[in-house]
Amino acid sequence: MTTKFTSIDEYIAGHSPEVQEILQRIRSTIKEAVPEAVETIAYNMPTFAVDKKSIVQFAAWKTHIGMYPIPPGDMEFAAAIDPYRTEKGTARFPYATPLPYPLIADLARFQVASVLGR
């Protein structure tokens, strides 16, 4: 049976301590980048929304963190995110390498601009 999460705290608590640390840091990175974002769960994943519109979601997998969607950004952002792009709108950040938290912050900011036109 799959657990149905009701909060990001619940989602994070369901993972190993090492992954919990990464998830908490992603959470705080997004909150710092987009302070007006509201935390929620959508598709059973941690989600941040602004003006009731989903901005960014993330999920812990066996070997990586997945983030969805990848917004259009400037050329510098596109070049930086490209090594992590796996499918249209998906980025995978492997646990085996340090996560690029500044890039995750940019992803959140560019997604706000993309979705809300800000």
Image: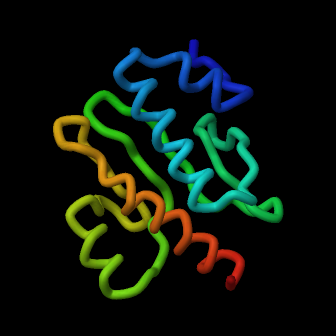
Image quarter (top left, top right, bottom left or bottom right) of the N terminus: top right
Give above or below for 17 relative to 71: above
Q: Write the residue at 46% across / 80% down.
A: 72
In the foreground, 38 or 5:
38
Q: Residue furthest left?
A: 96
| Quarter where residue 109 is shown | bottom right
Q: Write the residue at 40% across / 34% down.
A: 22
In the foreground, 46 or 89:
46
Q: Write the residue at 59% across / 25% down.
A: 11
Give above or below for 65 relative to 3: below
Q: Which color scheme is applied?
A: rainbow
Place of residue 30 in the rendered image (x, y in percent of width and height, measured from the top left): 56, 53
In the foreground, 39 or 44:
39
Give above or below for 108 relative to 24: below
Q: Residue furthest front?
A: 32
| Quarter where residue 35 is shown | bottom right
How many numbered discs? 0
Place of residue 99 in the rendered image (x, y in percent of width and height, measured from the top left): 29, 47
Image quarter (top left, top right, bottom left or bottom right) of the C terminus: bottom right
Give above or below for 3 relative to 82: above
| Quarter where residue 94 is shown | top left
Tell whether 31 sits left or right of 71: right
Place of residue 4 in the rendered image (x, y in percent of width and height, measured from the top left): 67, 23
Q: Which residue lies furthest to the right in this view?
A: 51
Place of residue 102 in the rendered image (x, y in percent of width and height, measured from the top left): 38, 60
Q: Write the residue at 60% across / 79% down.
A: 114
